[in-house]
Image (cartoon, coloured by chain):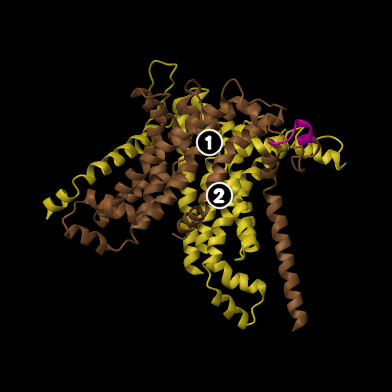
Amino acid sequence: MRRSTGAAVARRAGHLLVAWLVTLAFILPIYIALSSAFKSQRQILDNPLGLPAPFTFDNILTALQRPDQLVQGGLANSILVTALTVGILIPLSSAVSFWVSERGPRLKGVLLAVFALGLMVPPQTVLLPIVQLLQAIGLGHSYPGLILSNIGGGYLSFAVFVYVGFLRTVPREVIEAARVDGANDLRIWWTVVLPLVRPATATVGIFLGLWVWNDFLNPLFILGPLQGQTITTGIYVSLGGYSADYGQLFGIMFLAAIIPIVGYLVTQREFIHGLMSGASK
Amino acid sequence: MRTSTWRRSLGLAPIALVALALYAAFLLYPLIQSLFTSLTDRNPLKAESTFVGLANYLELFTDQRLLASLRFTIVVVVVVTLVSNAIGLLFAMLLNKPTAGFRVMRTLVFIPQVLSGVIVAFIWRSILTQNGLLNTALQNIGLIDAPISWIGTPELATLSICAVVSWMTIAFSTVVYTASLQSVPPELYEAARMDGANVLSRFRNVTFPMIAPGMTISVVLCLITTFKLYDIIAVLTGGGPADSTRSTAFYLVATAFTNNRFGYASAIAILLFVLTAVTAYGLTALLRRREARL
């Protein structure tokens, strides 16, 4: 009995050790990137795995003092595009999802099949017609154009599937009760549905926020080089050529990566929950 | 009855119609437009475009650069889907313990999926490039004498792309499989253990059938993600060396925006869409059927 407990403890400790080694090896590139942001060029090359000692803020300061304002400008543009896209998509997609849920089974099936297309279409397939359409309506190479095409594209499909899936779990009686009280659907959506689907809104907000923030292809071709850059395309355009200045490179990487990483760590419970509810469907 | 339905959705219906109109304008219309353009020789440098029937589609079969891009795309899709599902499942089994330490590890493993492909590719480029961190480290410990060209030869560059994309998708697969594993009722394992089932047979008869739905999600999403791969290639190799890492999505964008061959690019766009949709639908159907059998 005693020996078997000892063996069990040893096995558990072994499991824990292996798990940590595997995890740390897997995220080693992230450690290298984040720690290198606070090292000198020499330290990065001589000892890429070492801790940043002595600690330096030079890379961060150099990144922030670039004359082209790559980091500040990029972050401001990314925040603008992401906030407006997600801020408009959440009410719009929850409203259309509620409206679709209230249709008869035939129409609902057709509409959902049409929305499913958006999950399947590679963004490159529709990129050229979108760029041409935006130019035709005078929104070519503009932020409103980028935001509008974000709202109408595949992101809407994703949001609709999350909301419609969640609305299936809302008891009919709740909606019917509000209807008996004489509320119209607009009022029911605002006062009953939106508070009820808050977990779905968290999922939609977190995932769309991340995808729009990280998007590369659409800002690169829809905005073009004249309108300034989001942080993602800005990094690509400014650092596209091979450069051996790792210090500055990692300084910029740190400033660009820290917002999604912190956002993920803060919202990770909703994040994983959203992924799980999506994966179980 | 009809009037009352109509009246009660007054107010909500306009918002829904705005959403449907935007979706029609920025997804359905571009898709149909691509289809029409693919039947023409449209080029912005020419004043007029003419209907050419299926000529663009016939060109697809003889365009060696396109065929090479298809070969590369299929290699990456297959390798990434297999690797990220195998390793994702292993990671999930390794990390599926309820204690705080394991929770922290699960949080850390997902981080690659949170970063943009551009940042991921820049991090890996600084590691893999000729005078990068990997070669420097290998030379410092004396394992190699001359730096290895990790992204400079066609074979190694393809391998590097597969590795970097897998690194991102493994993070995703791990979380999906962890969720699936946590949905397996512990009683099932108890029962299997009582029946004298060993680790392997417990995995085959309990774990594997129970995670089938998660596997469907993970496989199909890895597939869709890899078919539309663009940013990692753009930063890590730019499609090189000698176009050996040019995916079909990458070739499509170059044909449209660099070579201005709108008609032919649209044929590639339709090909890429059909390829993605058929593979995704086909695999979903196949895996769902397997789920039902298990």
User: Where does residue A160 sit, x and y in percent of width and height?
Assistant: 36, 49
The reply to whether residue B35 is in sight is no
Magenta residues span A37-45
The kind of residue on which mark 1 rests is Ala
Secondary structure under badge 1?
A: helix
Which residue carries the number 2 mark?
A265
Report the side of B167 relative to B128 (left or right): left
Give the chain ID for the yellow colour: B
- Compared across the picture, whether B269 is left or right of B196 comes to left
Q: Which colour denotes chain A?
A: brown
Secondary structure, mark 2, is helix
Q: Which of B41 and B183 is in front in this view?
A: B183
Circle 2 Cα neighbour tier, 10 Å, few/some/many (<14 / 14–19 / ≥20): some
Query: Does the magenta-highlighted stretch encompass residue A90?
Result: no
* Mark 2–mark 1 distance (CA, rounded to whole Å): 32 Å
Asked where in the image residue B65 lies, by quadrant, the reply is: top right
- Residue A21, above or below B132: below
- Subunit under mark 2: A
- Quarter of the image for residue A180 reads bottom left
Residue, disc 1? B249
Image location of residue B25, percent across then percent down: 33, 35
Q: Which of B64 and A46 is in front in this view?
A: A46
Please tell me whether residue A153 is drawn above or below residue A10 in the rendered image: above
**What amino acid type is highlighted by mark number 2?**
Leu
